[in-house]
Image (cartoon, rainbow, N blue to C red):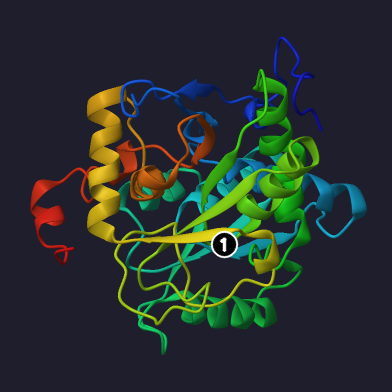
Amino acid sequence: MPFAGTRPTIASSIVDCVGHTPLVQLKRLFARPGLSVLAKLEFMNPGGSMKDRPARYIVEQGLRDGTIRPGTQIIESTSGNLGVALAMVARVYGLSFTCVVDPKITKANLQILHQLGANIDMVDQPDDQGGYLQTRIRRVKELLTILPDSFWINQYANELNWKAHYHGTGSEIVEQLDGPVDCLFAAVSTTGSIMGNARRLREAFPSIKIVAVDAVGSVIFGSPSAPRELPGIGSSRVPELLNPDEIDEVVHVSDRESVQGCRDLLFHEGIFAGGSSGSVIAAVRKLLPSFPPSYRIAVILPDRGDRYLDTVYDDDWASGLPSL
Protein backbone atom coordinates (compact mmCIF):
# COMPACT_ATOMS: atom_id res chain seq x y z
CA MET A 1 0.00 0.00 0.00
CA PRO A 2 1.62 3.31 -1.02
CA PHE A 3 1.97 6.01 1.60
CA ALA A 4 4.05 9.17 1.81
CA GLY A 5 6.58 9.55 -0.97
CA THR A 6 5.45 6.56 -3.04
CA ARG A 7 2.32 7.69 -4.90
CA PRO A 8 2.42 6.64 -8.57
CA THR A 9 2.01 9.21 -11.32
CA ILE A 10 -1.15 7.50 -12.59
CA ALA A 11 -3.32 5.89 -9.92
CA SER A 12 -4.84 2.49 -10.61
CA SER A 13 -8.07 3.43 -8.80
CA ILE A 14 -9.62 6.14 -6.64
CA VAL A 15 -8.44 4.16 -3.60
CA ASP A 16 -4.82 4.78 -4.58
CA CYS A 17 -5.55 8.52 -4.27
CA VAL A 18 -6.10 8.28 -0.52
CA GLY A 19 -3.57 10.31 1.43
CA HIS A 20 -0.93 12.87 0.47
CA THR A 21 -3.10 15.72 1.71
CA PRO A 22 -1.62 19.23 2.01
CA LEU A 23 -0.24 20.86 5.14
CA VAL A 24 -1.24 24.53 5.10
CA GLN A 25 -0.31 27.42 7.38
CA LEU A 26 -3.28 29.32 8.82
CA LYS A 27 -1.65 32.75 8.62
CA ARG A 28 -4.83 34.83 8.51
CA LEU A 29 -6.89 33.11 11.16
CA PHE A 30 -4.01 32.98 13.65
CA ALA A 31 -1.94 36.04 12.86
CA ARG A 32 -0.21 36.43 16.24
CA PRO A 33 3.55 37.02 15.89
CA GLY A 34 5.54 33.93 16.84
CA LEU A 35 2.57 31.60 16.49
CA SER A 36 2.44 29.12 13.60
CA VAL A 37 -0.63 26.92 13.07
CA LEU A 38 -0.26 24.24 10.38
CA ALA A 39 -3.40 22.48 9.19
CA LYS A 40 -3.44 18.99 7.68
CA LEU A 41 -6.30 19.16 5.17
CA GLU A 42 -7.72 15.66 5.50
CA PHE A 43 -10.94 16.68 3.76
CA MET A 44 -8.94 16.58 0.53
CA ASN A 45 -8.96 12.79 0.57
CA PRO A 46 -11.09 11.53 -2.34
CA GLY A 47 -13.96 10.42 -0.11
CA GLY A 48 -13.95 13.78 1.65
CA SER A 49 -12.50 12.88 5.04
CA MET A 50 -9.66 11.33 6.99
CA LYS A 51 -11.81 8.19 7.32
CA ASP A 52 -10.62 7.19 3.85
CA ARG A 53 -7.36 6.13 5.47
CA PRO A 54 -8.65 3.46 7.90
CA ALA A 55 -11.27 2.32 5.38
CA ARG A 56 -8.59 1.57 2.83
CA TYR A 57 -6.07 0.21 5.33
CA ILE A 58 -8.49 -2.15 7.08
CA VAL A 59 -10.09 -3.50 3.91
CA GLU A 60 -6.80 -4.03 2.09
CA GLN A 61 -5.24 -5.73 5.12
CA GLY A 62 -8.32 -7.94 5.39
CA LEU A 63 -8.04 -8.91 1.73
CA ARG A 64 -4.38 -9.78 2.27
CA ASP A 65 -4.86 -11.91 5.38
CA GLY A 66 -8.15 -13.53 4.30
CA THR A 67 -10.46 -12.02 6.93
CA ILE A 68 -12.17 -10.28 4.00
CA ARG A 69 -12.82 -12.28 0.84
CA PRO A 70 -14.80 -11.84 -2.37
CA GLY A 71 -18.42 -12.13 -1.23
CA THR A 72 -17.77 -10.84 2.29
CA GLN A 73 -20.44 -8.48 3.61
CA ILE A 74 -18.67 -5.59 5.37
CA ILE A 75 -20.65 -4.04 8.24
CA GLU A 76 -19.97 -0.89 10.22
CA SER A 77 -21.68 1.54 12.55
CA THR A 78 -20.85 5.10 11.48
CA SER A 79 -22.00 8.70 11.75
CA GLY A 80 -21.32 9.08 8.05
CA ASN A 81 -17.73 9.70 6.97
CA LEU A 82 -16.37 6.20 7.54
CA GLY A 83 -19.47 4.89 5.84
CA VAL A 84 -18.75 6.96 2.74
CA ALA A 85 -15.11 5.85 2.79
CA LEU A 86 -15.99 2.18 3.18
CA ALA A 87 -18.65 2.40 0.47
CA MET A 88 -16.05 3.87 -1.89
CA VAL A 89 -13.46 1.21 -1.08
CA ALA A 90 -16.04 -1.59 -1.23
CA ARG A 91 -17.16 -0.39 -4.67
CA VAL A 92 -13.59 -0.56 -6.00
CA TYR A 93 -12.97 -4.04 -4.58
CA GLY A 94 -16.39 -5.46 -5.48
CA LEU A 95 -17.52 -5.98 -1.90
CA SER A 96 -20.95 -5.54 -0.31
CA PHE A 97 -21.26 -2.99 2.48
CA THR A 98 -24.00 -2.49 5.07
CA CYS A 99 -23.87 0.83 6.88
CA VAL A 100 -25.65 1.23 10.23
CA VAL A 101 -26.47 4.91 10.73
CA ASP A 102 -28.71 7.10 12.88
CA PRO A 103 -30.90 10.19 12.31
CA LYS A 104 -28.03 12.62 12.98
CA ILE A 105 -26.20 11.63 9.80
CA THR A 106 -26.03 14.57 7.39
CA LYS A 107 -28.40 14.45 4.43
CA ALA A 108 -25.46 14.75 2.06
CA ASN A 109 -23.64 11.75 3.52
CA LEU A 110 -26.82 9.68 3.42
CA GLN A 111 -27.32 10.51 -0.27
CA ILE A 112 -23.69 9.73 -1.07
CA LEU A 113 -23.98 6.34 0.65
CA HIS A 114 -27.05 5.55 -1.47
CA GLN A 115 -25.26 6.57 -4.66
CA LEU A 116 -22.24 4.41 -3.81
CA GLY A 117 -24.51 1.39 -3.40
CA ALA A 118 -24.27 0.90 0.35
CA ASN A 119 -27.04 -0.95 2.16
CA ILE A 120 -28.42 1.57 4.68
CA ASP A 121 -29.68 0.34 8.05
CA MET A 122 -31.09 3.26 10.06
CA VAL A 123 -31.62 2.94 13.84
CA ASP A 124 -34.01 5.38 15.49
CA GLN A 125 -33.97 4.55 19.20
CA PRO A 126 -31.56 6.60 21.38
CA ASP A 127 -29.37 4.68 23.79
CA ASP A 128 -29.19 5.25 27.56
CA GLN A 129 -26.64 8.05 26.99
CA GLY A 130 -29.08 9.99 24.82
CA GLY A 131 -27.13 9.22 21.62
CA TYR A 132 -27.34 6.40 19.11
CA LEU A 133 -23.93 4.75 19.25
CA GLN A 134 -24.88 1.88 21.57
CA THR A 135 -28.03 1.29 19.54
CA ARG A 136 -26.03 1.18 16.32
CA ILE A 137 -23.56 -1.30 17.78
CA ARG A 138 -26.37 -3.55 19.01
CA ARG A 139 -27.78 -3.51 15.49
CA VAL A 140 -24.38 -4.41 14.03
CA LYS A 141 -24.20 -7.44 16.33
CA GLU A 142 -27.68 -8.49 15.22
CA LEU A 143 -26.68 -8.21 11.56
CA LEU A 144 -23.60 -10.35 12.15
CA THR A 145 -25.90 -13.21 13.14
CA ILE A 146 -28.24 -12.62 10.19
CA LEU A 147 -25.94 -11.89 7.24
CA PRO A 148 -23.78 -14.78 5.98
CA ASP A 149 -20.02 -14.23 5.62
CA SER A 150 -20.18 -10.83 7.31
CA PHE A 151 -17.26 -8.88 8.79
CA TRP A 152 -17.48 -6.01 11.30
CA ILE A 153 -14.91 -3.24 10.76
CA ASN A 154 -15.30 -2.20 14.45
CA GLN A 155 -13.51 1.14 14.20
CA TYR A 156 -13.58 1.78 17.97
CA ALA A 157 -11.54 -1.33 18.75
CA ASN A 158 -9.70 -2.27 15.55
CA GLU A 159 -5.95 -1.71 15.98
CA LEU A 160 -5.67 -1.16 12.22
CA ASN A 161 -7.57 2.10 12.71
CA TRP A 162 -4.77 3.86 14.58
CA LYS A 163 -2.11 2.14 12.48
CA ALA A 164 -3.64 3.64 9.32
CA HIS A 165 -3.02 7.09 10.76
CA TYR A 166 0.40 6.18 12.13
CA HIS A 167 1.63 5.03 8.73
CA GLY A 168 -0.45 7.56 6.77
CA THR A 169 -1.36 10.93 8.28
CA GLY A 170 1.34 11.02 10.93
CA SER A 171 4.14 9.93 8.62
CA GLU A 172 3.05 12.48 6.03
CA ILE A 173 3.06 15.31 8.57
CA VAL A 174 6.59 14.39 9.67
CA GLU A 175 7.78 14.37 6.04
CA GLN A 176 6.02 17.65 5.19
CA LEU A 177 7.36 19.61 8.16
CA ASP A 178 10.52 21.68 7.84
CA GLY A 179 11.18 21.49 11.58
CA PRO A 180 9.65 20.32 14.87
CA VAL A 181 6.19 21.19 16.16
CA ASP A 182 5.36 21.87 19.79
CA CYS A 183 1.77 20.66 19.85
CA LEU A 184 -0.83 18.57 17.99
CA PHE A 185 -4.58 19.30 18.17
CA ALA A 186 -6.87 16.47 16.99
CA ALA A 187 -10.60 15.85 17.35
CA VAL A 188 -11.61 12.55 18.96
CA SER A 189 -14.35 10.01 18.41
CA THR A 190 -12.95 6.51 17.87
CA THR A 191 -9.56 8.00 18.97
CA GLY A 192 -7.83 6.08 16.16
CA SER A 193 -6.64 9.27 14.51
CA ILE A 194 -5.21 10.91 17.63
CA MET A 195 -3.54 7.69 18.81
CA GLY A 196 -1.89 6.96 15.48
CA ASN A 197 -0.76 10.53 14.89
CA ALA A 198 0.46 11.01 18.44
CA ARG A 199 2.57 7.86 18.31
CA ARG A 200 4.17 8.78 14.98
CA LEU A 201 4.79 12.44 15.83
CA ARG A 202 6.23 11.57 19.26
CA GLU A 203 8.81 9.38 17.57
CA ALA A 204 9.96 12.38 15.55
CA PHE A 205 9.36 15.07 18.20
CA PRO A 206 9.53 13.47 21.69
CA SER A 207 8.53 16.65 23.57
CA ILE A 208 5.38 17.31 21.52
CA LYS A 209 2.18 18.05 23.46
CA ILE A 210 -0.95 16.14 22.39
CA VAL A 211 -4.28 17.94 22.81
CA ALA A 212 -7.52 16.01 22.34
CA VAL A 213 -10.51 18.04 21.16
CA ASP A 214 -13.75 16.50 22.41
CA ALA A 215 -17.39 17.53 22.27
CA VAL A 216 -19.29 18.86 25.25
CA GLY A 217 -21.54 15.95 26.22
CA SER A 218 -19.07 13.25 25.14
CA VAL A 219 -18.07 10.66 27.76
CA ILE A 220 -14.68 9.69 26.27
CA PHE A 221 -12.68 11.40 29.02
CA GLY A 222 -15.14 10.97 31.88
CA SER A 223 -17.36 14.00 31.41
CA PRO A 224 -21.13 13.61 31.92
CA SER A 225 -23.21 12.66 28.94
CA ALA A 226 -25.30 15.38 27.29
CA PRO A 227 -27.05 15.84 23.95
CA ARG A 228 -24.77 16.56 20.97
CA GLU A 229 -25.86 17.59 17.50
CA LEU A 230 -22.70 17.40 15.38
CA PRO A 231 -21.68 13.97 14.07
CA GLY A 232 -18.07 12.85 13.85
CA ILE A 233 -16.76 14.17 17.17
CA GLY A 234 -17.31 12.80 20.66
CA SER A 235 -18.77 9.50 21.73
CA SER A 236 -21.27 8.01 24.18
CA ARG A 237 -18.77 5.28 25.08
CA VAL A 238 -15.06 5.05 25.78
CA PRO A 239 -13.26 3.59 22.74
CA GLU A 240 -11.10 0.52 23.27
CA LEU A 241 -8.35 2.19 21.23
CA LEU A 242 -7.91 5.06 23.68
CA ASN A 243 -4.83 5.24 25.90
CA PRO A 244 -5.44 8.39 27.99
CA ASP A 245 -1.84 8.37 29.22
CA GLU A 246 -0.80 9.46 25.71
CA ILE A 247 -3.01 12.56 25.86
CA ASP A 248 -1.60 15.65 27.58
CA GLU A 249 -4.69 17.85 27.62
CA VAL A 250 -8.38 17.64 26.71
CA VAL A 251 -10.43 20.59 25.47
CA HIS A 252 -14.21 20.28 25.31
CA VAL A 253 -15.99 22.32 22.66
CA SER A 254 -19.73 22.96 22.34
CA ASP A 255 -21.70 22.62 19.12
CA ARG A 256 -22.07 26.40 18.92
CA GLU A 257 -18.32 26.92 19.35
CA SER A 258 -17.69 24.37 16.61
CA VAL A 259 -20.02 26.22 14.24
CA GLN A 260 -18.21 29.48 14.93
CA GLY A 261 -14.86 27.77 14.36
CA CYS A 262 -16.03 26.51 10.96
CA ARG A 263 -17.23 29.93 9.92
CA ASP A 264 -14.05 31.64 11.12
CA LEU A 265 -11.98 29.16 9.13
CA LEU A 266 -14.03 29.82 6.01
CA PHE A 267 -14.05 33.61 6.41
CA HIS A 268 -10.34 34.08 7.14
CA GLU A 269 -8.74 31.22 5.18
CA GLY A 270 -11.29 30.24 2.53
CA ILE A 271 -11.20 26.70 3.93
CA PHE A 272 -14.63 25.04 3.73
CA ALA A 273 -14.46 22.35 6.40
CA GLY A 274 -16.82 20.26 8.52
CA GLY A 275 -17.98 20.36 12.11
CA SER A 276 -15.08 18.63 13.82
CA SER A 277 -12.65 20.93 12.00
CA GLY A 278 -14.46 23.86 13.56
CA SER A 279 -14.11 22.16 16.93
CA VAL A 280 -10.34 22.01 16.49
CA ILE A 281 -10.18 25.69 15.56
CA ALA A 282 -12.30 26.60 18.59
CA ALA A 283 -10.01 24.54 20.85
CA VAL A 284 -6.91 26.35 19.58
CA ARG A 285 -8.63 29.67 20.32
CA LYS A 286 -9.44 28.54 23.85
CA LEU A 287 -5.83 27.68 24.65
CA LEU A 288 -4.35 30.65 22.75
CA PRO A 289 -3.63 32.71 25.91
CA SER A 290 -1.57 29.85 27.38
CA PHE A 291 0.82 29.50 24.41
CA PRO A 292 4.37 30.81 24.85
CA PRO A 293 5.54 33.70 22.60
CA SER A 294 7.03 31.30 20.04
CA TYR A 295 4.89 28.25 19.41
CA ARG A 296 4.24 25.87 16.49
CA ILE A 297 1.06 23.83 16.28
CA ALA A 298 -0.19 21.11 13.94
CA VAL A 299 -3.96 20.64 13.62
CA ILE A 300 -5.94 18.02 11.73
CA LEU A 301 -9.02 19.15 9.80
CA PRO A 302 -10.98 15.90 9.32
CA ASP A 303 -13.70 16.52 6.74
CA ARG A 304 -15.20 18.90 4.19
CA GLY A 305 -17.90 21.48 4.69
CA ASP A 306 -20.28 20.89 1.79
CA ARG A 307 -21.87 18.02 3.70
CA TYR A 308 -22.84 20.43 6.50
CA LEU A 309 -24.72 22.99 4.42
CA ASP A 310 -28.00 22.11 6.15
CA THR A 311 -26.45 22.21 9.65
CA VAL A 312 -23.23 24.09 10.44
CA TYR A 313 -23.63 26.54 7.55
CA ASP A 314 -27.39 26.98 7.92
CA ASP A 315 -28.24 30.04 10.04
CA ASP A 316 -31.64 28.72 11.12
CA TRP A 317 -30.15 25.41 12.31
CA ALA A 318 -27.27 27.12 14.09
CA SER A 319 -29.57 29.59 15.84
CA GLY A 320 -31.34 26.66 17.49
CA LEU A 321 -28.19 25.46 19.27
CA PRO A 322 -27.89 26.11 23.02
CA SER A 323 -26.11 29.33 23.98
CA LEU A 324 -22.56 29.11 25.32
* Camera-side residue of 197 and 142: 197
* Camera-side residue of 298 and 258: 298
* Camera-side residue of 191 and 108: 191
Answer above or below: position of 151 versus 133. above
In the picture, which quadrant includes the C terminus?
bottom left
**Total count of labels:** 1
Task: Give me the residue at 61% from left, 48% from top.
Answer: 209
Task: Give me the residue at 68% from left, 54% from top.
Answer: 195
Q: Position of residue 11 (x, y in %)?
A: 70, 18
Task: Give me the residue at 48% from left, 38% from top.
Answer: 292
Answer above or below: position of 131 versus 25. below
Q: Position of residue 3 (x, y in %)?
A: 76, 29
Q: Position of residue 296 (x, y in %)?
A: 54, 31
Q: Residue furthest right?
A: 65
Indicate the amino acid at tag 1: Thr
* Camera-side residue of 79 and 65: 79
Q: Residues within 10 Å of mark 1 (few under 14, many from 20)?
A: many
Q: Position of residue 20 (x, y in %)?
A: 64, 24
Horizontal arrangement in the rendering, residue 293 relative to residue 105 (left or right): right
Q: Quadrant of residue 305?
A: top left
Can the viewer see residue 58? Answer: no
| Residue labelled with disc 1 | 98
Answer above or below: position of 148 versus 94. below
Task: Give me the residue at 77% from left, 19% from top.
Answer: 5
In the picture, which quadrant includes the N terminus?
top right
**Circle 1 sits in a helix, a strand or a loop, which is it?**
strand
Can the viewer see residue 126? Answer: yes
